[in-house]
Amino acid sequence: MNTIQINHITKTYRQMTSPALDNLTLEIGTGMFGLLGKNGAGKSTLMKILTTLEYPTRGTATIYGIPLTRPQEIRNLVGYLPQNFTFYPNMSVSDALAYLATLANVPVREQHHRIDDLLARVNLIDKTNTKVKNLSGGMLQRLGIAQALINNPRVLIVDEPTAGLDPEERIRFRNLLADFATDRTVLLSTHIVSDIETTTNHIGILNHGQLLFTGTTNDLIVQANDHVYEATTSVAKATDFKQTHQVSEQVTYDGQTHFRFIAETATDKPVHATLEEAYIYLQLQHEGVFS
């Protein structure tokens, strides 16, 4: 069963010359689904529509069969972590979650147990009495996940959750999302390829509001496998090489510069594409670089 069904959604804004979302159709099932795209691709707009913070100009969507036109029912199903999660800075962690639990209509008799359980799951149980303003960036994001789960949702939507986190926190946060995805739907929106690569096999790629690809990460890589090459130049010629090739990787040692690059065709040594290179190849195709 598809948890989320999106049908021909278009979203336009008066101040924009092109739509933020352009006739988007997408099916998302249980587990982790990664939505990948550049900043401005339309990811956050889609997140806001699915959480009923905004409505589409045209098109429809359902979550577990419930249309977006029934917002209260949708909000009972969905937990949401926005890109920039903030909360009252002088509240303690436990008071913040208690306040949000009340807003989410969690019965008072259940709140204490649920808050303790969530804080344990996001590894903040020792920060119960810490004020929100004293949390690190990673801790604040974990508090954001806890608030998104306070109403025990069946769908968790997270928008650019690892932006600004250090590498250790980023790994911890991705693992946390993967744990939650075992028994619910998690929709992860990001422009960071490694967030997708290490957490999910099912992805969609947005560019300028259009869906360029949906499928598995392996399917995407296969499309690019004949379009990634290796080459070596002298250090003196490296700058000229970069000006004429779509370079994806560059390493210099022993007086030579070694490149991986993306091309429609080349006479250099072909190599297997990484997910990031496959993503770049798809974007370059869409932009007409190889036409």
Image (cartoon, rainbow, N blue to C red):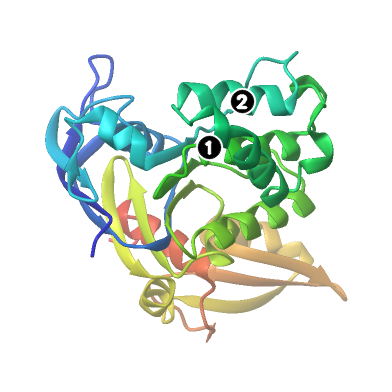
Q: Is residue 6 left or right of residue 53?
A: left
Q: Residue at x 56, y 61 (%)?
A: 178
Q: Is residue 237 left or right of residue 7?
A: right
Q: Which element carries disc 1, helix, strand or loop?
A: loop
Q: Residue at x 75, y 13 (%)?
A: 90
- The mark found on residue 150 in the picture is 1
Q: Is residue 167 left or right of residue 231?
A: right
Q: Which element carries disc 2, helix, strand or loop?
A: helix
- The mark found on residue 141 in the picture is none
Amino acid type of disc 2?
Ala
| Residue 69 position within the rendered picture, expressed as x and y whole percent measured from the top left | 16, 30
Location of residue 18 (image quadrant): top left
| Residue 258 position within the rendered picture, expressed as x and y whole percent measured from the top left | 71, 73
Q: In the rendered image, which residue does mark 2 sit on? A: 98
| Residue 172 position within the rendered picture, expressed as x and y whole percent measured from the top left | 71, 55
Q: Quadrant of the N terminus?
A: bottom left
186 vs 103: above or below: below
Location of residue 61 (image quadrant): top left
Residue 20 visible in image: no
What is the CA distance from the residue labelled 1 to the residue labelled 2?
9 Å
Q: Residue at x 69, y 38 (%)?
A: 164
Residue 260 visible in image: yes
Location of residue 290 (image quadrant): bottom left
Q: Nearer the viewer, residue 26 or 98?
A: 98
Q: Nearer the viewer, residue 89 or 42?
A: 89
Amino acid type of disc 1?
Ile
Q: Nearer the viewer, residue 252 or 271?
A: 271
> Badge 1, how many Cα within 10 Å: few under 14, some, many 20+?
many
Tell which residue pokes out farthest to the front in this image: 109
